[in-house]
Amino acid sequence: MEQTTQALNVFIGLLRVSGKLEAVVKKDVKNYGLNITEFSVLEFLYHKGKQTPQTIQERILIASSSTTYVIDKLVAKGLAERKTNQADRRETYVAITDPGCQLMAEIFPQHATTIGRCFADFELDELLQLEKLLKKVKNN
């Protein structure tokens, strides 16, 4: 029973921390005219290159209907574009545009600094341990 009680306490703590981190990120990306989902998709494309909408949906953990909406908004802002796979014209990719890359090159270092401040009280070995423990929870 003790482990179950402690697990519930940890779960509540994770939810609170997640909420705090989400609030920090929302505030941070709002300064750039993006919402957190748009930023997440743009960041994914910036670091991983062109992707299918399905891959974006799976990696960013958003609903299928929301994926299309978010991509449409990024395309309308000129930050992303849809490209047809020339080998299989039924398949579409989403790619970051040059203006999208320029924006991410400008804002990502500041974003990384903002996130870093959230973990400023941790030593490197503590961050590595936390990452390991979170992966253990994720994979359970």
Image: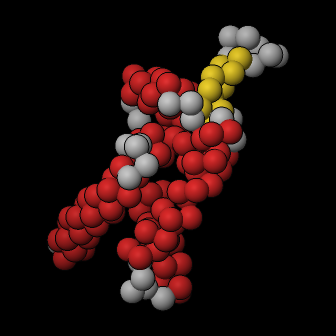
The residue nearer to you, when weighing 25 against 57, is 25
Q: Is residue 124 above or below residue 27?
A: below
Residue 54 horizontal/vertical position (percent) = 55, 28
The residue nearer to you, when weighing 46 against 88, is 46
Residue 83 horizontal/vertical position (percent) = 69, 21
Residue positioned most to the top = 90
Specify the quadrant of the image occupied by residue 62: top left
User: In the rendered image, is residue 52 in sight?
Assistant: no
Q: Is residue 70 above or below residue 25?
A: above
Q: Please report the residue visible at 40 percent of the width from the left and 43 percent of the height from the top.
A: 33
Q: Is residue 70 above or below residue 110?
A: above
Residue positioned most to the right = 87
Specify the quadrant of the image occupied by residue 130: bottom left
Specify the quadrant of the image occupied by residue 9: bottom left
Q: Please report the residue visible at 53 percent of the width from the left and 85 percent of the height from the top.
A: 124
Q: Quadrant of the N terminus?
A: bottom left
Residue 26 horizontal/vertical position (percent) = 33, 53
Q: Is residue 46 above or below residue 18?
A: above
47 sits to left or right of 8: right
User: In the rendered image, is residue 127 in sight?
Assistant: yes
23 sits to left or right of 74: left
* Number of dots carrying numbers: 0
Q: Quadrant of the C terminus?
A: bottom left
Q: Please report the residue visible at 53 percent of the width from the left and 57 percent of the height from the top.
A: 107
The residue nearer to you, when weighing 84 against 52, is 84
Q: Please report the residue visible at 38 percent of the width from the left and 58 percent of the height from the top.
A: 28
**Colouring scheme applied when the structure was drawn:** secondary structure
85 sits to left or right of 52: right
